[in-house]
Amino acid sequence: MTALYDELRPVSAEQHYRITHFLNYEYRLLDDERFDDWLALMHEDIHYWMPGIENRRRENLLEHGFYAADHMAFFDDRLRDLGRRVARFQQPSAWAENPATRNVHQLTNVEVYYGETDGEFIVYSTFQSVRSRGLDEEYVIYGRRQDLIVADGDRFKIKKRLILIPNATLTCKNINTFL
Amino acid sequence: MGNIIKTLDVTDSLTGLKDVCDLENGRIAGKIFYDQAIYEQELEKVFARCWLFVAHESQIPNTGDYITTTMGEDEVIVIRQKSGGIKVFLNACPHRGNKVCFAESGSTRGFICNYHGWSFNVEGNLVGQHESGVYEDSNFDKSKWGLKEVAKVDSYKGLVFATFDPEAPTLKEYLGPIAWYMDALFDNQEGGTEFVGGCIRSTYECNWKIAAENFVGDILHAGWTHDSAARAMLGGAVAKVSDFEESYSVNWNGHGYEFALDTVGNVAVLGESALNKYLHTIKPSVAERLGDFRSNMIGSVSSCTIFPNFSFLPGQNTVRVWQPRGPNKMELFTWVVVNKSAPEEVKEKWRKGAMMTFSPTGVFEMDDGENWEYCTKTAKGRVTAQQDLFVGLGMDSLLTETPLPGNVYEGQLNEANSRAFYQYWYDMLNSRSWSEVPNRNVGKPEAE
Ligand code: FES
Ligand SMILES: [Fe+2]
């Protein structure tokens, strides 16, 4: 549910810049297949969640409208799970990753607010992930994201990520990337 | 009886099918994955005729609970009745054909069409219209214009199937002895099974048969295709199937179940020791319920397809339908099945484990998709589409002395189930009615 502007505490322009910069950096790591470096940006208690979207009538909505915590999901991961996904990408026998998938991740509409405790930031954004494989395959996934970012010294870690796509049917066969 | 569905007029069978589907010689050709004319015949002679999976009983427990799905490319509503039964209607308004239910699931007292306001109750009867007076002036007979009901609906151990063809055999006859093996997943504990909430759908540029065949009897691919996923989840390679002392491929009416007797080979790839432990804990009670033999199958290296497009993996507990969307397009609907009586933590681990392995983000499934898409796409070439493809493993492996029911073949690394799947598909395409479908079953129709 979108909080009204009065209830939100936007961060300074400088803090906004630092966090946006951090999230752009994170996406560039993914585009460069630097998965270990990417994984190192995750907080040890990371909850990386992309629920399945259900096309329901307004009078039959779920716990969170189109999705629910105990229903099926694309990702519902902790650090160990993300580590396993990364391990699969890195196997020489990941046949379907060779030739590599070429990725472009984009982040826009970034809003950064102070979280409940010191050093916590709530980030709303929209994203677009474009993947191409082979000579002519192209897959585009877009959606909204809500991140909980925590300060880690003079850097940041990602503690929660909620990924919401508008599609009730994924328009491609897989998501062989992170969003 | 205005709500009874019209059946299709049968068109002639295609000529030349034998050239691209010759199972006696262990050969098919890529044309069967890419040809538009073949696809049109499938919609009519396979999907408008066979029993198709539409829902699990647990998805619609109460009166008015519904889900929508497709039977072939036909959209349907599956809805629980006051009587406790289940009806399946075409999701198309009998006035101009508009879709009447746009949601994928929910609970309702009826459906009202958005176009001219015809309204239908849970039983599918037309109960009102916007400007109803004008219909009365035209001597309109409401009782003839309800939602069209499919010919038959029946269920097996919580799995609801439907068919458009009134002449189809009973579901029991259709499943035959494969039902006995299905109990290893769907009836291994008192109370039966339920689906986890939701349904994950994804889109493939592949023919539906290549996916259905993968689950009917292609464990051969697992050790190679899924090596990376196995190493990621288990820290090592998948179990070498050729090392199993005892394993089987069993088929009947084009359905196939291939399995080892290692109890936890499939569940192990979820990398959750609590699930292995759960299966070991229930195993003695399964043995009491189903006998020792099937208690070894509750999460073993195994897979099954019920012809034409319903598949599942015991252990990973993924259940799926490969929905045809054109000769080279498919939508995959997936669900997760769990024992109703399992502890909540166990159900939760299966919900996550099935996602981690067999879903669009699953580390196993990610490697399947590209293979299936390119088995389809290479057949775009007219010359390529006519070339023989080898489906000849285990030609002489039929077991004639076995006490097991069904057409039983020795070993899982065997293309007997794939051949039986394509043979049944061929037979359906060549038959003008159910009575013409040849009976090629040679094994015992029932367990002893
Ligand atoms: S199409 Fe449904 S009321 Fe006219
Ligand atoms: Fe596979």
Image: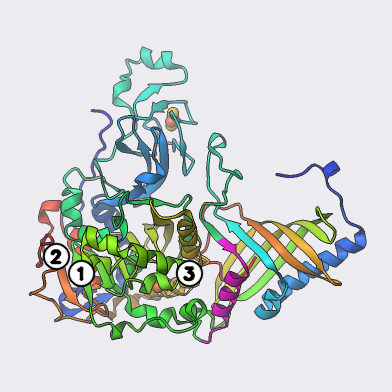
Residue B65, placed above or below residue B343: above
- Disc 1 sits on a residue from what chain? B
State which tag comes first along the sequence, 2 or 3: 3
In the rendered structure, does residue A80 fall within the stretch colored magenta?
yes
In this view of the protein, can residue B420 be seen by the observer? no
Give the magenta range.
A75-92
**Front: mark 1 or 3:** 3
Q: Does B247 sit left or right of B119 as displayed? A: left
Find out whether the residues at labels 2 and 3 contact each other: C-beta distance under 8 Å.
no
Q: Circle 2 marks a residue in which chain?
A: B
Check disc 2 and report its element: helix, strand or loop: loop
**Image side of residue B428 versus residue A99, left or right:** left
Q: Residue at x 38, y 59 (%)?
A: B319
Specify whether residue B138 is in view: yes
Which chain is indicated by disc 3? B
Question: Within the image, what quadrant is residue A30 found in?
Answer: bottom right
